[in-house]
Amino acid sequence: MSDITNHLRMDKFPHIWCPGCGNGIILRSVLTAIDKLGLDPNNVAVVSGIGCSSRSAGYVDFNTVHTTHGRAITFATGIKMAKPEKTVIVLTGDGDCSAIGGNHLIHAARRNIDLTVVVFNNSIYGMTGGQFSPTTPQNDIAATSPYGNLDNSFDLCELTRAAGASYVARSTTFHATQTPLLIQKGIENKGFSFIEVVTACPVYYGRLNKTPDAVDMLKLQRDNARNIKQWNMMTDEEKQGKFVIGELYNKPAPEYTEKYTQLIEREKSK
């Protein structure tokens, strides 16, 4: 097992996350992936926005930026354009990246710029009191939908794949051994990589939806997730109430900063 403590700012602990929150599992997965790849910490930039998950940037000992709400991908894009040699990782939540930051997510995927975006999807705005987010399932209860959420929820993996991401994967905090491997492959991909990790917020989402126990929420992830091989053999009827995990898409494509460099060189040569 990787020793991730070298990548933590221990003076920033204890963390602020609630008991039963899965954010620590995801952060460990990110650090394990970085450790496995043997990346130089001085060459890694971690960018976050606003929300429970985005506090992660404060706990890790890399080049870090804790930015404004929904703008983590824009800051990360600027870093990558200025310093294309850096490994740039975005840690964000479902509300941060797909609501106020939704347009940035789509266009970063469209450009296939070399960012690795790890989304902590707890299906709700946890830090601000339990409002429904774009990934809150229809009819579920939130602080702003006490009679049930009417909106259709985003499938973030399908969204980013359709927009142009060259690597897309999904895991859960229950599948803690699989998640670092998916993140590692995302970092290795030269292009826009999107990894969604389904996690639990027992304090807000769970309490409002009659699953306040963190262990029960992990069991739901275990019982409802299906790996990609199983998923492809299931009927539409069997897929109801389930979701697919694993590497969902991996197709290398020209990367944005490389194309930008080529453009500059081409114009210089004229």
Image: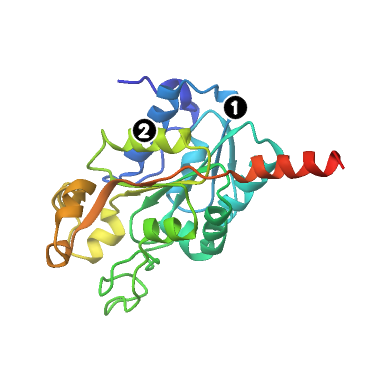
Of the pair 92 and 145, the residue shown nearer to us: 92
Q: Residue 84 has which mark?
A: none
Q: CA distance from mark 1 to mark 2?
A: 19 Å
Assign the N terminus to one quadrant of the image.
top left
Pointer 2 residue: 28
Which numbered disc, 1 or 2, marks the residue closer to the eye? Answer: 1
Give the amino acid at mark 1: Asn
Q: Residue 43 has which mark?
A: 1
Assign the C terminus to one quadrant of the image.
top right
Q: Position of residue 150 (x, y in %)?
A: 32, 79
- Looking at the rendered structure, the secondary structure element under dot 2 is helix
Of the pair 123 and 21, the residue shown nearer to us: 123
Q: Is residue 267 left or right of residue 253?
A: right
| Up-down relation of residue 80 to residue 39 (above or below) | below
Residue drawn at the location 32% of the way across and 70% of the way down: 142
| Up-down relation of residue 184 to residue 107 (above or below) | above
Crowding around mark 2 (Cα neighbors within 10 Å: few <14, some 14 to 19, many 20+) is: many
Residue drawn at the location 62% of the way across and 52% of the way down: 74
